[in-house]
């Protein structure tokens, strides 16, 4: 009687631990969106994040196994390695309300010494960086739920800034005469409106820590849908240093002075990282 009980218990345990292993190759296309931004701090002004996107193609090698319980339920566990090629778009915007600069010991056309005081106000700038992303991540899936974690390498393809019209006010102090000049527009003094400016920013490669997780849905025999959340965070400062001035030299055209600007990232910050968090959907086909 005791042997019969033991044998039945073993049969139940064995039937509950029945395992079938298999390796699959999975090819996928994905798209995601959310807060996808350039992360930095400005010594002057403020920064706001912006919406971006992430899309591309992937390949995953999966080593899976199915566990069959004694009641006939199937529980699947998958381990895998994921890579591919993608495009990440990271956006940010900056505001500078008032910035004042002073340049000493300048000379005018008549050789008189003066000090230039410059105030810039109402400055707005948008930045956008497009990166080619190469992920290398591990995958674990239990039943319908999956998680991925690892790293991404981001290689800049395009990084641009665009600024909107701002106001510049120049005034000059002449120590010799103890006098201020504020209205001589022909000499570059007074209030001027800037032109909308745009240009390129110089970035290097970015190494990102990357996570993704959610639910995997089976649509047909070998087609699946992943839906979940993703998070990317740049581990390194990928901004290249430069010595550009914020406000470009004046252009004198018919007595009217206009000016352009370089990006605030070339003057008022030293560290720039990428960061993204959002929702992602992936359609996958197994082979």
Image (tube, rainbow, N blue to C red):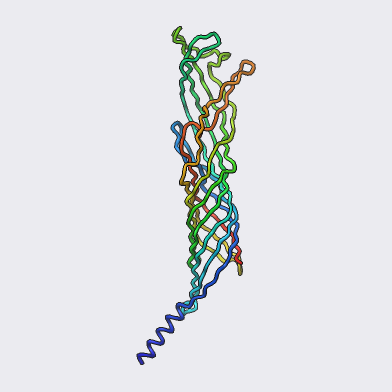
Residue extending furthest toward the top: 177
Depicted 161 relative to depicted 145: above or below: above
Q: How many marks?
A: 0
Using the image as rendered, state which of residue 20 and residue 29 is in the foreground: 20
Q: Quadrant of the N terminus?
A: bottom left
Q: Quadrant of the C terminus?
A: bottom right
Q: Residue at x 58, y 59 (%)?
A: 59
State the image quarter where residue 25 is shown.
bottom right
Residue extending furthest toward the bottom: 1
Depicted 186 relative to depicted 206: above or below: above
Depicted 165 relative to depicted 257: above or below: below
Q: Residue at x 50, y 9 (%)?
A: 112
In the image, residue 170 lies at what x, y percent? Answer: 51, 18
In the image, residue 198 lies at what x, y percent? Answer: 59, 33
Depicted 237 relative to depicted 124: above or below: below
Using the image as rendered, state which of residue 123 and residue 262 is in the foreground: 262
In the image, residue 11 lies at what x, y percent? Answer: 43, 84
Residue extending furthest toward the right: 254
In the image, residue 120 lies at what x, y percent? Answer: 50, 25
Using the image as rendered, state which of residue 247 and residue 182 is in the foreground: 247
Q: Residue at x 48, y 78 (%)?
A: 18
């Amino acid at each position: 009687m005791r042997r019969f009980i033991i044998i039945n218990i073993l049969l139940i345990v064995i039937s509950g631990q029945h395992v079938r292993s298999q390796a699959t190759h999975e090819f996928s296309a994905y798209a995601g969106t959310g807060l996808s931004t350039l992360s930095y701090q400005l010594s002057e002004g403020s920064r706001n994040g912006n919406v971006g996107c992430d899309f591309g193609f992937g390949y995953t090698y999966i080593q899976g196994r199915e566990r069959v319980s004694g009641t006939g339920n199937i529980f699947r566990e998958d381990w895998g390695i994921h890579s591919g090629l993608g495009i990440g778009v990271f956006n940010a915007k900056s505001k500078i309300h008032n910035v004042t600069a002073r340049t000493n010991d300048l000379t005018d056309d008549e050789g008189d010494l003066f000090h230039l005081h410059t105030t810039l106000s109402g400055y707005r700038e948008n930045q956008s960086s497009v990166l080619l992303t190469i992920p290398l991540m591990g995958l674990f899936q239990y039943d319908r739920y999956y998680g991925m974690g690892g790293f991404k390498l981001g290689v800049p393809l395009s990084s641009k800034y665009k600024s909107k019209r701002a106001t510049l006010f120049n005034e000059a102090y002449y120590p010799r005469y103890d006098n201020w000049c504020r209205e001589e527009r022909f000499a570059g003094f007074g209030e001027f409106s800037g032109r909308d400016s745009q240009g390129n920013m110089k970035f290097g490669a970015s190494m990102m820590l990357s996570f993704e997780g959610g639910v995997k849905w089976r649509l047909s025999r070998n087609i699946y849908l992943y839906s979940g959340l993703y998070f990317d965070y740049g581990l390194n400062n990928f901004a290249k240093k430069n010595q550009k001035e914020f406000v470009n030299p004046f252009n004198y055209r018919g007595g009217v002075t206009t000016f352009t600007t370089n990006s605030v990232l070339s003057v008022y910050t030293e560290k720039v990282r990428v960061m993204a968090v959002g929702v992602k959907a992936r359609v996958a086909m197994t082979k």
